Image: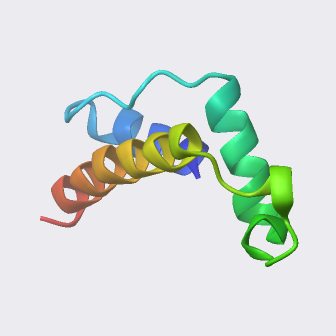
């Protein structure tokens, strides 16, 4: 997900910067594509508030870049 937005941002050579990526983003990435975090029995594997905020921040910035690309 982040790689797509990074590539798109580089191709435009403009736009808002993407948020810095770190371990929270890595963990959220695993949960997005693993799908297990949404299971009722996920327990400690469920989404944390920090992971949710990191994904929202990335998607907001990425969608701004997307909007610039399609104009």
Q: Is residue 60 above or below residue 3?
A: below
The one nearer the camera, 17 or 34, is 34
Q: At which x and y percent is residue 38?
A: 73, 73
Q: At which x and y percent is residue 65?
A: 27, 49
Q: Is residue 40 above or below residue 3?
A: below
Quarter placement of the C terminus: bottom left
Q: Does residue 64 appear left or right of residue 30 in this picture?
A: left
Q: Does residue 7 appear left or right of residue 15 in this picture?
A: right
Q: Does residue 15 appear left or right of residue 49 in this picture?
A: left
Q: At which x and y percent is residue 68?
A: 17, 54
Work out which residue is located at the far bottom of the displayed protein and give it: 40
Q: Please name the residue shown 67% across and 47% down the image.
A: 28
Residue 47: which quarter of the image?
Answer: bottom right
Residue 69: which quarter of the image?
Answer: bottom left
Q: At which x and y percent is residue 23?
A: 70, 25
Q: Is residue 37 above or below residue 16?
A: below
Q: Please name the residue shown 79% across and 71% down the image.
A: 35
Work out which residue is located at the far left of the displayed protein and give it: 71
- How many discs mark residues in the rendered view? 0
The colour scheme is rainbow
The one nearer the camera, 24 or 48, is 48
Q: Does residue 63 appear left or right of residue 58 in this picture?
A: left
The one nearer the camera, 50 or 65, is 50
Q: Is residue 35 above or below residue 24?
A: below
Q: Please name the residue shown 21% across and 66% down the image.
A: 70
């Amino acid at each position: 997900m982040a790689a797509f937005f990074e590539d798109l941002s580089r191709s435009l050579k403009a736009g808002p910067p993407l948020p810095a990526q770190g371990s929270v983003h890595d963990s959220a990435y695993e949960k997005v594509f693993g799908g297990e975090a949404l299971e009722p029995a996920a327990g400690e594997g469920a989404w944390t508030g920090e992971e949710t905020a990191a994904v929202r921040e990335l998607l907001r910035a990425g969608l701004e870049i997307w909007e610039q690309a399609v104009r």
